[in-house]
Image (tube, helix red, strand yellow):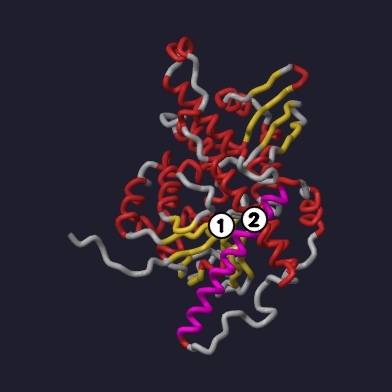
Amino acid sequence: MFKGFTFSTPEFPVVVPQTGLSFTVRSMNTGEVGKLKSSLVSPNVAHKFINKAIFDCLSDKPDFIDTYDDFKKFVTTRDREALLFALYISTFGEERDFNPTCSECGKENELKVSLNDMYQINMYPFSVTLTESYKLARAAQMTDHDPEIEAKIKEREDEEAKQKAAEEAAARMKKIEERRKKMLSEAQKNNPEVPDTPPDGITLVSKENVKKQEEAKKAAAEAEQERIAAIKIDPKDLLVPKPDKDSIMLDSQKEAIKKSQEYKDAMEAVNPDSILYLIEKVYLPVSKVTCFLKQPTLWEEEEVLSKAPLMGKDAQDVVSETLIINKFTQEEQDVILTDRADIVAGYQSLPPRDKMMIFEEFNKKFSEYEMKLDTKYFCKSCSSENVLRADITMLLFRSLSQY
Ligand SMILES: [Zn+2]
């Protein structure tokens, strides 16, 4: 039976803004688009199907991300927007029509815009990939001095950090070397006169560094093995409840223990400066409650929302809002809330000013690191300047509905 046409699928490489990981996302095919379209009829679970659609279309991803669960643990909900952009643009192309209304005169404008031109990304500066890229770029004098990043790099000059740096550098070296070999063999195919070694100054690597890099490569290979071994957990090795306890535990409780252990293990493999570890403490002045904020991953989002599948839309919105809250404490009254239902109840009881403060602080510390789609345009009726901002999820829904 015919299995499908052979052709090269469009792809889009992306570095996600918060965890700094690199991915390449390929286009969905017609079958996959149809599947995603039919799964989005229920908005309560849309996030799950979008996560899966992205994962299924990853044609390149970091080595330590093996399974779908790994993916969800290492990628934040903000990172997902950049991945969704890559999925969208490789599937539906970059040209889009918009009909925004001018904020000055209220007339409608017809615009044809390239989404690539609207794409802006603000990276979280302390992810390993980014600090390493920064060092490389500094070495090649391609970027300006950034005291904030440099201070952070210095602070992290311990053994573990060095090992990770070596590992990143070696991976990059390998890629550069592979690319060089490929280019060389292509060049030699066309012209047998081309020598095996490139002229000086072409590679990023100086000759005296070659030995160092060899050592780094070796250390990196060992570190990578250890890291992969640390992430790949045999479920059998996870917390096994004792038989007497086992008999009175519900399956859902066992499942929860297993998941929390897997989660802890995965987190140990993340670099200590990752945004995944960032917990921001906010003191709420009216209620005198302290709120601990964090950026949720896809995994945490699914966990929390899966507990509320039968809630009404409003209740589910409240639960979604509390995703960024890790914990509440109120010292005077000795209150610590970590259970999700307690957090939701605590959140609902806050005075509105405190609630607003939570979101202001979250936006300052986390949301700033994101992918944005916006562009300026001048109204064709009154010539005033406007900003057109697009939302990638809305764009996806629109394209799917037209499909
Ligand atoms: Zn106007």
Residue depicted at x 44% and y 50%? 55
Q: Quadrant of residue 247?
A: top left
Q: Residues within 10 Å of mark 1 (few under 14, many from 20)?
A: some
Label total for image? 2
Q: Is residue 169 magenta?
A: yes
**In contact (CB < 8 Å): disc 1 and disc 2:** yes
**In this picture, which residue range is highlighted in magenta?**
161-189
Residue pictured at 50% horizontal, 74% vertical: 182
Report the quarter where the N terminus lies.
Answer: bottom left
Could you say which quadrant of the image residue 297 lies in?
Answer: top right
Q: Which residue is under mark 2?
A: 129
Residue 233 appearing in the image: yes
Return the x and y of residue 30 as percentages of the image width and height.
31, 59
What secondary structure is marked by label 1? strand
Residue at 57% over, 72% down: 379
- On the question of residue 76 being in view, the answer is no
Label 2 Cα neighbours within 10 Å, binned few <14 / some 14-19 / many ≥20:
many
Residue 22 got which mark? 1
Residue 171, compared with residue 284, is above or below; it is below
x and y, in percent, of residue 20 in the image: 62, 54
Give the CA distance from mark 1 to mark 2. Answer: 8 Å
Q: Main secondary structure of the magenta part?
A: helix
Q: Could you say where residue 90 lies in the image, as x and y percent from the top left?
A: 44, 64
Up-down relation of residue 110 to residue 163 (above or below): below
The residue nearer to you, when weighing 102 against 342, is: 342
